[in-house]
Amino acid sequence: MTEATIIGIAGGSGSGKTSVTRKIMNQLSHLNIGLIEQDYYYKDQSHLTFEERLETNYDHPFAFDNDLFVEHLEQIKNKHHVEVPTYDYKVHTRSEKTLSILPKDVMIVEGIFVLEDQRLRDLMDVKVYVDTDADIRILRRIMRDMKERDRSIESIIDQYMTVVRPMHNQFIEPTKRYADIIVPEGGSNEVAIDLLSTKILSIARETKPVDPSIYQK
Ligand SMILES: Nc1ncnc2c1ncn2[C@@H]1O[C@H](COP(=O)(O)OP(=O)(O)O)[C@@H](O)[C@H]1O
Ligand SMILES: Nc1ccn([C@@H]2O[C@H](COP(=O)(O)O)[C@@H](O)[C@H]2O)c(=O)n1
């Protein structure tokens, strides 16, 4: 058996990570390919009231349970089945249901901080940073958060100015230096998506045996 190929896709909120991921998955649909979002690993906040959850900084690395994320990604790398948490942005905490991730040959991991934690980076075969200008990102976020995340325009702008923007500059943008490839403009960059798909395909075809020590645990 061979190890799963892990592709990390980072970038600011609204940069187009999800769109790039979807396009790559479409191009490689003949492979056994899956997706895991870092947002699934936002810490559970069910012990807090809704008002208390509004105070959380969701753009700081501490908002994520990366210990669990790393543990799951190691299992995914070794082609194990994992049950991952899911997240509900409307209520700012984990959902009741979990998601069953069956063994995949290629797994895309996507999220604002996937390149921030060295343990995650070390598990990746290709590291991508989607780089889109801040004005485009906020406009996309407004449209998406009003439509899909139950947010008002006032709350989106307030969150952007007080948290999203400063945290992006302090923590997310600097992770660009860890990327193997920087993709400007996200999902509309067809050339970059084609190049990435070709590279992923060629890595996935190389056979890397799973570390046998995992069977001795
Ligand atoms: N090239 C694009 N043109 C127009 N809208 C886009 C484009 N890329 C993404 N969007 C929209 O912007 C929003 C955020 O994009 P998404 O891919 O979810 O970004 P991210 O995952 O980085 O937050 C989504 O509603 C998406 O449909
Ligand atoms: N309860 C939450 C959790 C997260 N966010 C925001 O989501 C952004 C990350 O998701 P993207 O799909 O946009 O990459 C992040 O910037 C958080 O601000 C939120 O608003 N509420």
Image: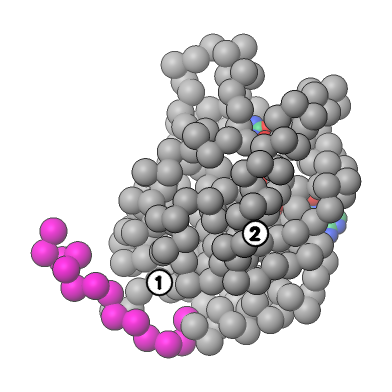
- Viewed as shown, does residue 217 lie left or right of 52? left
> Magenta segment, which residues?
204-217
Position above or below: 205 against 14: below
- Whether residue 160 sits left or right of residue 37 in the image: it is right
Tell me: residue 111, above or below residue 76. above
Q: Which mark is residue 4?
A: 1
Is residue 1 at all visible to an observer of this figure?
Answer: yes
Residue 25, visible in the rendered structure: no
Q: Is residue 92 left or right of residue 118?
A: right
| Residue 59: quadrant of the picture | top right
Residue type at numbered disc 1? Ala
Give the quarter of the figure containing the N terminus: bottom left
Point out which mark residue 176 bears. Answer: 2
What secondary structure is marked by label 2? helix
Q: Is residue 206 magenta?
A: yes
Q: Is residue 216 magenta?
A: yes
